[in-house]
Amino acid sequence: MQSAYDAVSGCFNQPLEFPLEIEILPKDYDFAGSLPLSPGIWFEERSLGIRKDALGKAFLDARLIFFGPQSTSLERCISDAEHYNASHILSLFDSEHLTAANLRKKHLLATKSGLDCTSDDDFRQLLRHELTINQSLLNSPLNRHTKSPVLWYHRRWLLQTFEPEICLMTHATSSSEAQGHSSRQDICLAEMSVVMRAGDLHPNNYYAFTYARWLTDFISNIENPALGDANIDALVDSCLDTLFDWCLKHPSDISGWSFLLSLFSRCTSKDRCATIVGKLLDITIGFRWHYGSVWIFIRTALFSTGALAEPDRIASVQKLRQQQSILDVSHREVDASKVERGPRASFSKALRSATLYLEHQQGETKNSQATNHG
């Protein structure tokens, strides 16, 4: 039976069409359904399970290879595939292992520059493999990897540095013509799926949605014929619906709602924004959501982004006032001691706070307009 290092390295080094789902298992875990690759390591299809003690053994071997006496200089490391393979295990054990991430950068740059005498197809295959392993680390139920600034920056660096190669890979495999959108949107949606999966695993994932903000700017500004025209409206529209559906499933996630607001500021279709806000108001009132992140989004979307036309904004405010009036009547008819407890009370307080804020903002707007006319 192979060693822990060889078993994990073999899983990473095989051709990966899809990202792996990696899970760290308890020390006493034993899966009787299949034979392990190595004591404490199981691999089935796209799932890799590693016991903590086995991961520790693999890490020690990887560290010995990476920092051993044969590694006298970084220049010597970057042409050695064994060191490159060991770096993935170091990142699996420690998501913030900056030296391992930097070595992979140098290995990719050296390969592209021809130091390893590889063809363009070989390099694109290596690049695709690196992106897949990075996604495996970001989208697996691991302790810190989904919110690792080192891993998110590494993915950002890959897109920035090898943008022409990624564009060609996406264009070659894209079904965009049949679906009526561009390869530019395919890249954006594919990367957004990585971001949202990381958001599923780690709520309020600041680093994931910071990457998403950078991504929309970066994709919009790429000048590459393989991606088609830079239609910013189509790009934003392709993200709006997907992100809004994700936010509805994670109503307490302020990072997702904040990113949706940033897309509102770039969306030129006020009707599209009004539709989203109207749907959100109906859901919020219907389910009596009291999440602060949802109410902050509603208040900001109505008055701070300029994404809604004035008639739509007035209609939304009137809907909130109407709901507030209904609650005020029900409060007078029901025992106050019963009203002021539980989710209903939280929803009532959130609605009242939002209504007061919106009325104040409307008053400020009217005063400002009166001053300007005066």
Image (cartoon, helix red, strand yellow):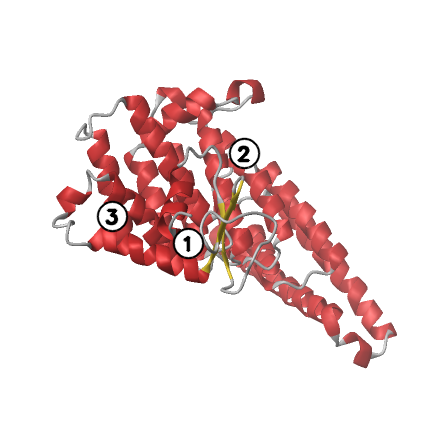
Using the image as rendered, state which of residue 290 and residue 172 is in the foreground. Answer: 172
Camera-near label (1 vs 3) is 3
Identify the disc placed on residue 102. 3
Spot occupied by residue 196 in the image (x, y as percentages of width and height): 52, 47
Q: Earlier in the sequence, mark 2 or mark 3?
A: 3
To which residue does mark 1 refer? 207
Camera-near label (2 vs 3) is 3
Label 1 with label 3: CB-CB less than 8 Å: no
| In-image side of 340 versus 307 (left or right) | right
Identify the residue at image location x=63%, y=47%: 277
Q: Earlier in the sequence, mark 1 or mark 3?
A: 3
Using the image as rendered, state which of residue 153 and residue 115 is in the foreground. Answer: 115
Outermost residue on the right side: it is 333
Question: Please, what secondary structure does the residue beneath circle 1 have?
Answer: helix
Spot occupied by residue 62 in the image (x, y as percentages of width and height): 30, 52
Say whether residue 181 is visible. Answer: yes
Camera-near label (2 vs 1) is 1
Identify the residue at image location x=70%, y=66%: 347
Q: Amino acid at mark 3?
A: Asn
Say whether residue 222 is visible. Answer: no
Using the image as rendered, state which of residue 192 and residue 119 is in the foreground. Answer: 119
Spot occupied by residue 235 in the image (x, y as percentages of width and height): 49, 32
Q: Amino acid at mark 2?
A: Ser
To which residue does mark 2 refer? 238
Q: CA distance from mark 1 to mark 3?
A: 19 Å
